[in-house]
């Protein structure tokens, strides 16, 4: 009689276990922006596009001189610019993720979660594009240098550099959008967009943290130093691209004065630093806050 061999059960990796939980969460709670967002109601210009406290001019002398209508128009243009930057980076993110899972095991929950994340990002990008158009804004694009740096980054970044950069972009957006989605001064359809993005991106950020830590387990000193620098430069480019300088002219303001006052605005710098405290703690715990990296985070007012 032939003996049968019982195979030991293969235990999933920590990342696969996290991915499976995220897949289960996505199946339970995900949104269809086409159905959830009110695209039909005309824009009510009595609302802001974002919480005023997040405006780049809030707290400046120029802000005090502006009419309430001008303030609301500015926040709508700024919200549209942030959305456009989000689309740009989500396109980079999708390529990073797809390149990372290329030719990997499609039965693995990590692979399936990665495709779920890409699908989420596609829907988010369309949602942001429609939202920016409804806010009455043009297509804001990052400056040419940022576009070319993004092109290089999406081509060569891998491992912790890719996932930590994803985390930085999403964490900064997450904090400001949590404020906007609760603020009744913000136009309702933008609040809905922010709520959808916050809920679904919370899963993306959890996975990015897990992947960053996992990839760093085998990283030596040199690799850690190089990737810490790459992540910091990517973060600087992303954050400084969020509000396009053209928003001021499109809001009917004196562009030169607005740019100068926004650049010197200590209130906005403080808001950025406070929004990134948790992120900086994570990067510090992962030993990614090297001296060269810190210089870029400080220039971007993230620390």
Image (tube, grey):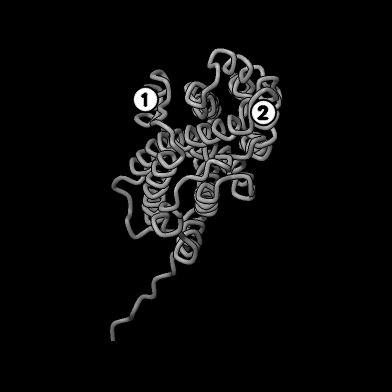
Residue shown at 37%/31% (left/top)? Answer: 154
Q: Is residue 206 visible?
A: no
> For this rendering, which residue is in front, 131 or 99?
131
Callout 1: helix, strand or loop? helix
Q: Nearer the viewer, residue 152 or 157?
A: 152
Q: Which mark is residue 291?
A: none
In the rendered structure, the answer to whether residue 94 lies left or right of residue 86 reads left
Q: Quadrant of residue 159?
A: top left
* In this picture, residue 215 sits left or right of residue 7: right
Q: CA distance from mark 2 to mark 1?
A: 34 Å
Q: Position of residue 198 (x, y in %)?
A: 55, 50
Residue drawn at x 66%, y 25% is 63
248 w.r.t. 30: above or below: above
Asked whether residue 106 appears in the rendered view, the answer is yes
Q: Residue at x 38, y 50 (%)?
A: 123
**Left or right side of 10 for 64:** right
Q: Quadrant of the N terminus?
A: bottom left
Locate the C terminus by quadrant.
Answer: top right
Q: Secondary structure at mark 2?
A: loop
Residue 293 drawn at (x, y percent): 59, 23
**Near-viewer residue (12 or 194):** 194
**Mark 1 sits on what residue?**
152
Q: Is residue 11 above or below residue 70?
A: below
Q: To which residue does mark 2 refer?
A: 58
Q: How many residues crowd around disc 1 within 10 Å: few (fewer than 14), some, or many (20 or more)?
A: few
Q: Residues within 10 Å of mark 2 (few under 14, many from 20)?
A: many
Disc on the earlier residue, 2 or 1:
2
Q: Nearer the viewer, mark 2 or mark 1?
A: 2
């Amino acid at each position: 009689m032939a003996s049968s061999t019982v195979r030991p059960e293969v235990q999933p990796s920590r990342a696969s276990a996290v991915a499976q939980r995220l897949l289960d969460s996505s199946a339970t709670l995900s949104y269809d922006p086409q159905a959830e967002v009110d695209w039909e109601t005309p824009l009510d210009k009595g609302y802001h596009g974002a919480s005023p406290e997040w405006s780049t001019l809030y707290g400046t002398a120029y802000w005090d001189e502006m009419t309430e209508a001008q303030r609301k128009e500015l926040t709508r243009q700024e919200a549209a610019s942030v959305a456009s930057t989000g689309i740009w980076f989500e396109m980079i993110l999708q390529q990073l993720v797809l390149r990372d899972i290329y030719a990997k095991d499609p039965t693995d929950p990590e692979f399936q979660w990665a495709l779920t994340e890409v699908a989420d990002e596609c829907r988010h990008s369309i949602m942001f594009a429609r939202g920016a158009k409804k806010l009455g804004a043009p297509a804001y694009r990052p400056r040419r240098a940022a576009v070319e740096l993004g092109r290089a980054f999406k081509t060569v970044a891998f491992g912790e550099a890719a996932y930590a950069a994803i985390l930085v972009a999403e964490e900064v957006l997450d904090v400001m959008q949590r404020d906007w989605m609760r603020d009744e001064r913000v136009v309702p359809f933008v609040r809905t967009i922010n709520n959808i993005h916050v809920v679904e991106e919370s899963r993306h950020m959890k996975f990015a943290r897990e992947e960053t830590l996992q990839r760093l387990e085998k990283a030596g000193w040199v690799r850690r130093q190089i990737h810490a620098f790459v992540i910091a430069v990517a973060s600087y480019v992303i954050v400084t691209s969020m509000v396009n300088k053209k928003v001021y002219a499109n809001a009917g303001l004196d562009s030169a004065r607005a740019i100068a006052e926004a650049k010197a605005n200590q209130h906005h710098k403080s808001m950025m630093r406070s929004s990134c405290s948790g992120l900086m703690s994570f990067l510090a715990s992962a030993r990614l806050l090297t001296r060269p990296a810190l210089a870029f985070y400080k220039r971007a007012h993230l620390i």
